[in-house]
Amino acid sequence: MLAGFIKSPLSQKRLTQDSVELYCEAIGNPIPEIQWWFEGNDPNETYAQLWDGARQDRVKINATYNLHSTSTISIANLTSDDSGMYECRASNDPDRNHLSKSPKVKWIRSQANVFVIERPEIATQVSESSGKLTLSCNVSTPQLAITGHKWMHGEKVLLQDEGTSAFTSYTINGKREEHSGIYECVYEANPQIRGQVNISVAPQVVAYKKSEHGNEGDTGVLVCKNPSFPAVTTWSWHKSGHGLLENASGRYIIKSSGNKTELRILKLDIEQDTGDYFCNGTNSFGTGDATVNLRVRSRLAALWPFLGIVAEVLVLVTIIFIYEKRRKPDEVPDEGSSSHVSASVLSPAVSRSWCPGQPQCPERGTPGDPGLEKR
């Protein structure tokens, strides 16, 4: 089966310093090979094949050959010389690359134009007044028709309109330190025009936890971070009464990357390591620091609640034992009262059988005596 395109590259407009990507897909049996060729706008320029890594490594070509052929060419950091005709060629003829024999089937071709337009200059400004920040962009001599504006912070759209002016602005309520970061003003045109507005401040360093606890002999970990822009370029750690902490000391390990720093203290000691630690971050706009308090506990600290409960139980048992010991001798009856009580609780019939002839025994035949009536 002869080669054929199922997806062809599309013409595009781009600004200088942007990047462009073209895609091509072909089928056939056997699976066809895909090549990329370029012809510039110069009338005397002819087609030249493009290779991966061409134009000072700005050209990248990725191809896959599975059930069919796919290929993508991307060009970074565009210049005006990148404008021209880009051609995707496909062929599955066995002699397609033979140096002396002509292929029986010519290469099939699909073309796309890339127009690289000079990027217009954008003047940006950040002004602060009455607790408000005003970000503004102004395109000088716009060459493209503007159909709207957008203000963005990361992927979030902050403001959008359909104005056609070369000037656009966005107002933020709050202080500069609270809203640092990278903002973009986007002009809706073909292609889009983007400007970058930076709100830059000195590091606003904060401790991950203001107070940390560790057990004696364990490894303590203290962390600080900087949520502001730009990132910290230099981190350092100090301890109250000790001075600068360094990795070379042996017990301290400092790991810092961008907007985060971490201090690890090996084999915590109650006497040496308890106290305040200061993390300091520096960038081109100034410095900032934060304090972390470290408390080192004894290894037996975890047993203290249990030992307290055991002590309370022992005290309670002792009190009960003493109370019972003092109460029992007072309540033990003597011999006389014991026999009297025992006799008094016996039934009259039984009592009479024990004390015949005694004065206190009831007379035999007393009216109402249930024992007499039964006899």
Image: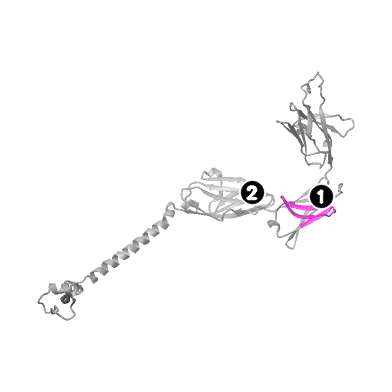
The image quadrant that residue 88 belongs to is: top right
Q: What element carries label 1?
A: strand
Q: Inspect the magenta stretch and tell me whether residue 164 lies in it.
A: yes
| Residue underneath mark 2 | 259
Segment colored magenta:
147-170
Q: How is the image coloured?
A: one colour
Asked if one can make out residue 236 in the rendered structure from this viewpoint, the answer is yes
Q: Is residue 268 left or right of residue 144?
A: left
Between 144 and 212, which is closer to the camera in this rendering? 144
Q: In this view, does 66 lie to the left or right of 317?
A: right
| Residue underneath mark 1 | 188
- In terms of sequence position, does the residue under pointer 2 or pointer 1 come before the other? 1
Give the amino acid at mark 1. Glu
The image quadrant that residue 165 belongs to is: bottom right
Q: Residue at x 13, y 72 (%)?
A: 353
For disc 2, the neighbor class at 10 Å (few under 14, some 14 to 19, many from 20) is many
Q: In this view, does 359 lie to the left or right of 203?
A: left
